[in-house]
Image (tube, grey):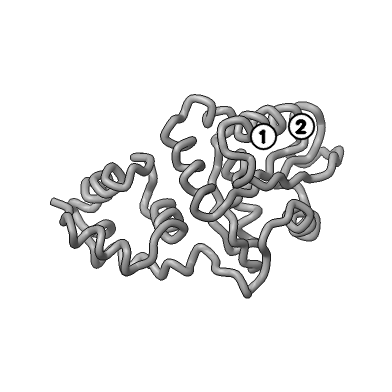
């Protein structure tokens, strides 16, 4: 696994699955065009861009460029790096234009795309795991594994101004990108969750 400092933004879950087999990074899906109407997700992307920087990696078809251009206009360009995959015709899960998407690219192609974009790759950089927040931390704070965990997570998400639909695993990635374990403990101790 190659650590990536920046948050990688992709179109969908298959892209995320492919990248998570190669990179140790926070990877956020736009849900395709769903990001256009999702103010919470856009606010989260802006916040992550300020904290870590973003690398946008969309398919090389028309839809990918529409999403890329939307994000380019909605988030400070100084905080966003653009990674591009080559146009490759293919039959395995191609787009409407007959091009392979991010999920159809080789690991070498994806690594090269992030390098060319200027992403911070390598062990010398902190990764999203640097916050030190684990599933055990979420359990200790009552945010997972307990009868009222979902309600407590919603309360924390609201307090931290994060999207309410983040599940426990996505919450873990986002919290590690934004906070250390000590900061999270302080936040929950200062104003305990009910």
**Position of residue 149 in the picture relative to residue 88 (left or right):** left
Is residue 14 in sight in this rendering? no
Farthest residue in the bottom direction? 124
Residue at image point 72% right, 38% down: 59
- The front one of 119 and 89 is 119
Farthest residue in the left direction? 194
Q: Position of residue 15 (x, y in %)?
A: 64, 46
**Position of residue 113 in the picture relative to residue 180 (left or right):** right
Q: Using the image, tell me which numbered label, if any, was put on residue 94.
A: none
Q: How far apart are marks 2 and 1 (CA)?
A: 11 Å
Decide which of tag 2 and tag 1 comes sooner along the chain.
Answer: 2
> Circle 1 sits in a helix, a strand or a loop, which is it?
helix
**Position of residue 62 in the picture relative to residue 142 (left or right):** right
Q: Where is residue 144 in the image (x, y as percent from the top left)?
A: 28, 58
Residue at image point 54% right, 47% down: 49
Callout 1: few (<14), some (14-19), or many (20+) C-alpha neighbours within 10 Å? many
Q: Using the image, tell me which numbered label, if any, was put on residue 61.
A: 2
Residue at image point 21% right, 58% down: 146
> Circle 2 sits in a helix, a strand or a loop, which is it?
loop
Above or below residue 103? Residue 189 is below
Above or below residue 9? Residue 5 is below
Judged by depth in the image, the label closer to the viewer, 2 or 1, is 1
Q: Using the image, tell me which numbered label, if any, was put on residue 68.
A: 1
């Amino acid at each position: 696994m190659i650590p990536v400092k920046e948050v990688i933004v992709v179109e969908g879950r298959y892209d995320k699955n492919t990248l998570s087999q190669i990179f140790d990074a926070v990877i956020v899906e736009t849900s395709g065009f769903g990001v256009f109407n999702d103010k919470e997700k856009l606010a989260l992307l802006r916040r992550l861009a300020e904290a870590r920087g973003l690398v946008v990696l969309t398919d090389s078809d028309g839809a990918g460029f529409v999403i890329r251009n939307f994000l380019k206009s909605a988030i400070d360009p100084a905080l966003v790096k653009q990674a591009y995959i080559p146009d490759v015709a293919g039959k395995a899960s191609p787009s409407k234009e007959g091009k392979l998407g991010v999920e159809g690219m080789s690991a070498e192609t994806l690594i090269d795309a992030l390098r060319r974009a200027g992403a911070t790759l390598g062990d010398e950089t902190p990764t999203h795991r640097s916050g030190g927040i684990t599933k055990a931390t979420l359990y200790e704070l009552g945010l997972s594994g307990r009868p009222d965990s979902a309600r407590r997570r919603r309360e924390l998400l609201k307090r931290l101004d994060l999207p309410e639909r983040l599940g426990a695993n996505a919450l873990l990635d986002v919290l590690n990108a934004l906070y250390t374990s000590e900061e999270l403990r302080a936040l929950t101790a200062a104003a305990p969750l009910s």
